[in-house]
Image (spheres, rainbow, N blue to C red):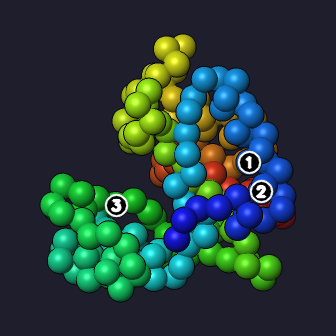
Amino acid sequence: MKPRIGDMDQELQVKFAAFSARMAEAGIPFALNCVLRTIEEQTAFYAQGRLPLHEVNVLRSAAGMYLLKTEKENYIVTKTKVSRHFPNQQGKSRAFDIMILRGDNKPHWDLKWDGNEDGISDYLEAAYIGQGVGLDAGGLWVSWHDYPHYELPTKA
């Protein structure tokens, strides 16, 4: 599913706009990678790194996702079967994932990349920016780092 800002919860849209502005100020180009996610997609992501590649690809195919080509691509990408990307009662997501872009506008997942050359990796800097605009930033989680992931804080 193509990620769209309009698929975000209204509060998330406001925080995303602030996040986007701060990322531009920091000189960190990025693109949305995921907003809404289906249960089938989450199931396939959860299987990744836990099941053999051919079983993961059966799930990815059923979810309409591209197939992984090598076992090297079959690594754990999520710790949960339940996602804040699932639509809420209004059909909107309470989370988004990004991909940081290099100078050629191609996405990368290199956690050490410092494209703006300020001495801090861009994915970590993005996490600080996300936290600064009031998002829970997966890159700053203690037990599991999910650098591309941002979500609205859970309300007490």
155 relative to 138 in the view: left or right: right
* Amino acid at dot 3: Ile
- The residue drawn where x is 31% and y is 81% is 61
Please name the residue shown 22% across and 80% down the image: 55
Q: In the rendered structure, which disc, 2 or 3, sits on the residue that comes first in sequence?
A: 2
User: In the figure, is residue 127 to the left or right of 105?
Assistant: right
Task: Tell me the quarter of the picture where residue 108 sits.
Answer: top left
13 and 105: which is toward the camera: 105
Q: Which amino acid, by three-letter code, is at mark 2?
A: Leu
Characterize the local packing of mark 2: few (<14), some (14-19) or many (20 or more) Cα atoms within 10 angstroms. many
Local secondary structure at mark 2: helix
Cβ atoms at labels 1 and 2 below 8 Å apart: yes
| Percent x, y of residue 23 | 66, 32
| Residue 76: image tag | 3
- Pointer 1 residue: 16
- The numbered mark, 3 or 1, whose residue comes first in the sequence reads 1
